[in-house]
Image (spheres, rainbow, N blue to C red):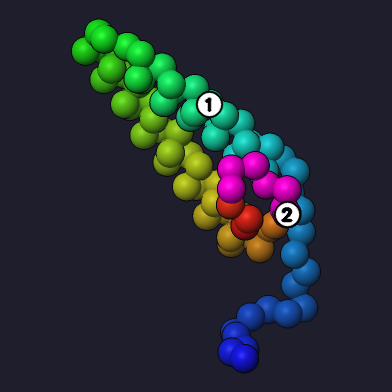
Amino acid sequence: MIIDLFADYKKTKTYDKVLTNEASRVIFELNNVYKLFNEVTDPYETESLIYRMKELETHYSYLIKEAKLGKIYNTNFIGGTNI
């Protein structure tokens, strides 16, 4: 058994409903953008959707980072990732 010597055992994990709701919203919106991306034919619209995907992916990465830094968890997290 490996023990993390630097872990802060006194700090309890918290549940941040706002953060997980925002992450769920981003995942939902990103899935919609993916679907739309597969249907468009206009090159300009395709380019704008690529930028939107990158924006949403970056925002989701930020939310994951914030959750990990705050040791926030939610066992019912939508998106397949338990923080």
Q: Residue, x 77% and y 78% (percent of image)?
A: 10
Identify which amino acid the numbered label 2 is placed on. Answer: Thr
Badge 1 density bin: few <14, some 14–19, many ≥20, Cα 10 Å: some
Q: Are marks 2 and 1 in contact (CB under 8 Å)?
A: no
The boundaries of the magenta stretch are: 74-80
User: Hey, which quadrant is residue 8 in on the image?
Assistant: bottom right
Badge 2 density bin: few <14, some 14–19, many ≥20, Cα 10 Å: few
Element carrying mark 1: helix
Measured from the top left, where is residue 61 in percent x and y? 47, 47
How many callouts does the rendering have?
2
Q: Nearer the viewer, residue 10 or 2?
A: 2
Along the horizontal axis of the image, is 24 left or right of 75? left
Identify which amino acid the numbered label 1 is placed on. Answer: Glu
Q: CA distance from mark 2 to mark 1?
A: 21 Å
Q: Which residue is mark 2?
A: 75
Q: Residue, x 62% and y 36% (percent of image)?
A: 24
Give above or below for 45 relative to 2: above
